[in-house]
Structures are given as C-alpha cells and as structure tokens.
Image (tube, grey):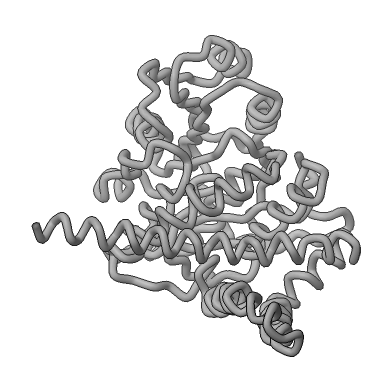
Amino acid sequence: MDGVLPAGAEAPIPHPVPADLLTGSVSLIVTAHRDGPMLRACLASVAKLNPPPLEVIVAIDGACSKIKEASGNFGFQTLELPEAPGVSATRNAGAAKACGRWLAFLDSDVAVASDHVTRALSALGDTSRTVAAMGSYDDQPAAPGLVSRYRNLLHHFTHQNARRDAQSFWAACGICEAKVFRQVGGFDETYRRPCIEDIALGYKLRGAGHRIALDPSWQIKHLKQWTWHDLVFTDIVRRAIPWTLLLFRENRLDNDLNIDTRSRWSALLVLAALASFGGAFFSPWLLAIPTACLAGAIFLNRRFYQFLARKEGWPLALGAIPLHLFYYLAATIGWVCGHAIFVLERMRRRN
C-alpha cells in the first residue's frame, strides 16, 4: 500500500512530528463486522506500518471467529462484542480498551500506507490547539466500474477541497486525543449502522471548543465495490436523512463538505428541473426551463467533472454526470424526509 499517492506524484511535506509523539502514543482501532477480502487487505496493510502504533485493536461488532483468527495471525488484539451493539458502541468499546494518548480510527474496507501513523500525528499539526484530525481517500480507488469510481472519487474530491479547519470528524481515517474523546462521550451509540456517527462526534468536539484539522495529504485507499443499490440507500437513508436531522437538532448549517453552498444550489437546481419538467407536456418551449436548471447544476460542478476527466477520461466523467445529478436529488429527498421527521418529533414533544 505504499502507492497511495499517484505514480510520479510528489508527496506533500508533512508537519514535523515531535519524537515523543511517535513513541508509544497511538492506539489504532479497526472496527469490523464481517470477514472478507477487504478486511484481510486492511489488516495486512496495518501489519506493515512503520513506525508501528502502540497497539492495534480490532473491535468486532458481533461474534466472528474468522476475524479473531485473522487478527491473531498478525498479532493484533481483538475485542469481540457478541451482542452486536452497532458500529458506534463497538468503536467506543475499542477506545475504552486502548492505552494510547491518541486514538486512530480505521474502517475495515480501507488499506493504509506504511507511514500512516506518522501522517496521522502530522495531520494534527499544533497539538496544543488541535485535538483531532482526519484525512482523505486517495485518487486511485481499488474497485472498478462507473458507480464505484464515481462514488469513491467524489469522496476524494470533496475532502481535497474542504476547509482545513474542519467542522466534523471522519472515522474511516481519523485520529482524536483519547482524553478529549472520552470527555465528550465518544460516538453516539444510538447510531447502530454506519452513517453520520462520526459527523456527530465532530459536532460534539467543536461544540466543546476543540479544533479538528483536515489534512488532504493524509490518504487511505478505499476498497469498497459500490452498487447502484448501495448508492441510493446510502445517500438517502444513511446520509441525507440522519444528517438533516442532526443539523436541525443542532440548529446549524455548515458551509463545508457535502453541504456547502455549491451543493445546496446544485440540489435546488436539480429539484427545480424535476418540478418544471412536466411543463414540457403542455409546450415544448417549456422544456427550456428544466434544461437550463440542469445545465446550471452541471456548470456549478464543472471542476469535479474536469477532475474525473483528468483521472479517468471523459467517457467516465460524462457517465458520472447523471449519477451526480441523482446524488443531489437523493440529498433533497433525504432533506425533505429528515425535516418531516424533525417536525414530527417537535410536535410530539409539545404534546
């Protein structure tokens, strides 16, 4: 996994890492739910870390002897939770077992570069001000196919162009000071399925006055093969609806990551195109309205499509445009559903 950066690319110069931080300070927590090739590849990459972390804890959401065996073959600790309490509770259990000053979290469907520990600490920068940091997927995802290439590269592009002073956290590739993590209560265990539990943690950290850094040069490789069903279900059910609920409950609207101003305008334009499309049945001239709306959404996202064209060629970039427009439609559907749930919750509290 040393080839996280594109071939021939020059690695960004990381922040200097004090020697005392490199010695016995990082507990790496990998959360796993089922055995498989992605988990095996993840563990194999972790076994090659140089310098190694203080400890590697594989926290298992459920009972799985094969995961225990695979982890044991690499000399990693395992923490099995047979009752399968969910991803947040499993991460919290791993964090409770950890001994390091810093908790580095890792999903089981990624692979890391050999210098992952150094880059994790480097991403923190000034640790007197910063208690957590997160990285990015690289621009060479493992899975083939239009849906997988589009979805993984969208995540890479989003993090590469996000604010360095982050408002949220990312558990797929994130590090947090253990003391502060425990002070804010860790991950919200009401989130049993992977969704926005790490975003919620980031909001708690920021609400407590702490700084979170995003270092785009700290990269991991995503191994997941996306399907069309995964795309629809994840974007609506596991992302848009719970994130909308969280935003309303927190009474906030950040201008960053997937909810920046450009994304909001893009979603509105896609919704307007859909709402005005019926007018074309009454007059062909009215087809100009949805066409203009979609053209506006495409124009707003031109940098992303140009990035895809540079990486994968124009055929994939053009093929990704309908997927990206649907992504904004899914976000809008999720926002409407999340808002409706929030209103119903508020009405029940009043009654």
| Residue 161 vs residue 218, the one in the foreground | 161
Quarter of the image for residue 143 reads top right
Residue at x-position 37% and y-position 54%: 200
Left or right: 80 as drawn, with respect to 349: right
x, y percent for residue 140 = 79, 51
Instruction: Residue lying at the far left in this picture: please name it.
Output: 351
Left or right: 205 as drawn, with respect to 21: left
Instruction: Residue lying at the far front in this picture: please name it.
Output: 282
Q: Quadrant of the C terminus?
A: bottom left
User: In this orientation, does residue 20 appear?
Assistant: no
Left or right: 159 as drawn, with respect to 96: right
Residue at x-position 68% and y-position 30%: 38
| Residue 150 vs residue 42, the one in the foreground | 150
| Residue 44 vs residue 13, the one in the foreground | 44
Left or right: 269 as drawn, with respect to 191: right
Instruction: Residue lying at the far bottom in this picture: please name it.
Output: 285
The number of numbered badges drawn on the structure is: 0
| Residue 21 vs residue 206, the one in the foreground | 206
Residue at x-position 47% and y-position 59%: 334
Please, is residue 330 above or below residue 102 in the view?
Answer: below
Please, is residue 128 above or below residue 288 in the view?
Answer: above
Residue at x-position 63% and y-position 49%: 231
Q: Quadrant of the N terminus?
A: top right
x, y percent for residue 124 = 49, 58
x, y percent for residue 202 = 39, 57
x, y percent for residue 320 = 77, 61
User: In this orientation, does residue 25 appear?
Assistant: yes
Please, is residue 111 above or below residue 232 in the view?
Answer: above
